[in-house]
Image: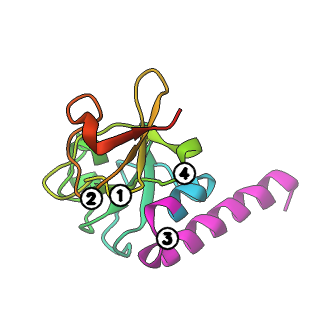
Amino acid sequence: MNLIEMFRELGRYNARKLRAEAKDLTGTEIIDREDSVPKFDAEKDYSEWPLNAPVSDNGQVWLLLQPHNAAHFPDLKPETNRACWGLAHTKNPEKAKAWVDAYGTSGMYMTGECYADENGVVYRALTDNLVYNAIDLPSAWEKIV
């Protein structure tokens, strides 16, 4: 096994380990290990994956809510298949992701969770169950950076 193959195997190992542990981790803990989060694969069968298993797509980390075979829904990605994928948020301002609207109760921001606006300004939630960003509900957010 050459060095590149060893690193690939290490990456696969870390992704499997994170997938198994994700059910017990917060969004912050998962995003802190984002380098081990596999990219979403529209041809992959996620039917046997555990709930809360993460994937990355379009700059976000998504958590499996409903196991399914993505190949059966070739035009759906996590951001357009919100019945199957929930959004992970972080309390770490340095790793804040862009704002994505909640989908029902999935993806709501909780106290302390952060997002970065299009200018890189980071906001921290001051209350739970937020579905409005700092422009639409400024009293619920603290400007960090």
Q: Amino acid at mark 3?
A: Arg
Query: Magenta part of the protein: which range?
Result: 1-28
According to the picture, the residue beneath numbered tag 3 turns out to be 19
Of residues 103 and 14, which is closer to you in this image? 103
Q: In the rendered image, which residue does mark 1 sit on? A: 111
Q: Disc 2 and disc 1: Cα gap in Å?
A: 5 Å
How far apart, in angstroms, are the residues tagged by discs 4 and 1? 12 Å
Q: Amino acid at mark 1?
A: Thr
Does the stretch in magenta take in 26?
Answer: yes
Name the residue nearer the viewer: 5 or 85. 85
Q: Are marks 4 and 3 in contact (CB under 8 Å)?
A: no
* Residue 70 image-quadrant placement: bottom left
Q: Which label number is shown at residue 92?
A: 4
Q: What distance separates the C-alpha of mark 4 from that of mark 2? A: 16 Å
Contact between labelled residues 1 and 2, with CB atoms less than 8 Å apart: yes
Residue 6 coordinates in the image, percent (x, y): 80, 61
Instruction: Say which label, 4 or 2, has the lower sequence index.
Output: 4
Q: Judging from the image, what secondary structure is the residue with disc 1 in?
A: loop
Q: Secondary structure at mark 3?
A: helix
